[in-house]
Image (cartoon, helix red, strand yellow):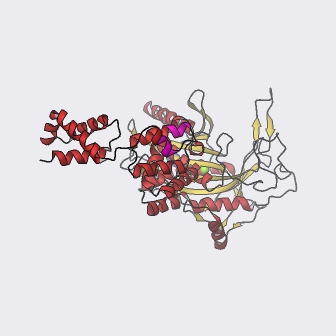
Amino acid sequence: MNTAVNTTPANAPLVQGYEVVIGFETHAQLSTQSKIFSRAPTAFGAEPNTQACAVDLALPGTLPVMNVGAVERAIELGLALGSTIAPRSIFARKNYFYPDLPKGYQISQFEIPVVQGGAVEFYLGTEKKTVRLVRAHLEEDAGKSLHEDFIGQTGIDLNRAGTPLLEIVTEPDMRSSAEAVAYAKELHKIVTWIGICDGNMQEGSFRCDANVSVRKPGAELGTRREIKNLNSFKFMQQAIDFEIRWQIEELEDGRAIQQATVLFDPDTGETRAMRSKEDAADYRYFPDPDLPPLVIDPAWVERVRGAMTELPRVMAARFITTYGLSEYDAAALTQSREVASYFEAAAKACGQPKLVGNWIMGEISRRLNAAESDISTCPVTPAQLAQLVARIHDGTVSNNAARQVMDVLWDDPQAQVDEVIEAKGLKQMNDTGALEKIVETVIASNPKNVAEFRAGNAKALNALVGQIMKASAGKANPQQAGELLRSKLAV
Ligand code: ADP
Ligand code: MG
């Protein structure tokens, strides 16, 4: 592990005087049709034990055969995160006994994983964060114990045995539960964006283990406890926050933290020790003699690279150069492929990328959030947004009026922007003669504000513009009104 991080960053947020340190291990289930070392299907939800073949059941005489699709997905993740793809990596046996593990060992990678280094970059609010990766390694999943359908017995379902996983391990770079959740969301975005994982957290396709410790700033890293299998962002935040409070309380009460594996109980909102943590030595890792080293030559890496879709950060960079967006806006508009393509379609259609971006990040996402939905079910099409933005840009409607148009579009997908503007009388007053009359009336009837403005109070101008907007029933262009006022009141 890189020790540079052991120093406390100058801006680390403290909780009751303690610095929080978090590192993540994430299991992403790879979206292959068949298992990592056998041809059994990986589909979710089948009848127990209908998708486990002789290899998955560890019957004598069977041998694992590497699934090329799983390797390519690991390469894709490495390329997406700027990691090194190991030219030669090794599969190892991780030995432990558990009823859902028929071989008595899990095939994983230990000393030489396929993906090494790299980083995940994201925004926490407006602050840019970088979480470094240690590694990502290929491994097989175990089966499942079924407790609910049996009384006094445990059932075993081996459908999941041999499902391909990529375990993605970070340096302990995170300093708060909010940062940890933002990291997990970004990683989730990347694996689903490049299509190596379906990201379904309820079905367990993307599950995170959060390693949490606390220390006084500048001290050695504290002892960590590992919260296992967090499968929703909400529970992730709750679990880490509980764990931080618990650890600080223990230390404040003079007790030392014992390294342990814990589970989060959503019903109580608490974490609970499951077992004391095993060390690597407990697993007696050794290279699996059934599998040759995994050799990946540069030509293979390039083939995979050539077939990959545009990555979020590449797309964000393109949005900055092509559309003149800020880095922050570009990141927000590439939060998912759907948002990005919605933005691009609307921006191209009206030629006003900044305005389009503002509307997507503002009005549209506010409405989608309120409806607990996302852009894929947005009732307003990119073409409609483009049209509305064009009408704002050419001065036909004010921003305020445009919001009223959006109200109508939201409820009626058939509505036409220009017709709504017409029908609701939302056209901005572009006739300077008419506007001038209103400005003059307002000046004449608000001597107090006029005097204040002349005395140097810039805010008084806003009050006058407000009066003009009122007198024009909202149809005046506030910018134009301000300019007219200024020129008429110029001393
Ligand atoms: P193991 O393989 O035993 O789980 P690792 O060294 O691989 O241990 O670390 C697992 C995870 O725990 C990594 O994400 C790492 O960043 C994180 N981690 C290690 N030490 C700490 C610590 N003191 N506090 C918080 N996280 C830690
Ligand atoms: Mg580990």
203 lies above or below 242: below
Left or right: 327 as drawn, with respect to 488: right
Q: Is 319 in front, or is 285?
A: 319
Q: Is 466 in front, or is 204?
A: 466
x, y percentage for residue 467?
26, 35
Boundaries of the magenta span: 408-421
x, y percentage for residue 394?
40, 52
| Secondary structure mostly seen in the magenta stretch | helix
Q: Residue at x 24, y 44 (%)?
A: 436
Left or right: 44 as drawn, with respect to 306: right
Q: Can I make out residue 161 in this image?
A: yes
Q: Residue at x 35, y 37 (%)?
A: 474
Is residue 391 covered in magenta?
no
Where, by quadrant of the figure, is residue 371 drawn? top right
Q: Can I make out residue 222 in this image?
A: no
How many discs appear?
A: 0
x, y percentage for residue 124?
45, 47
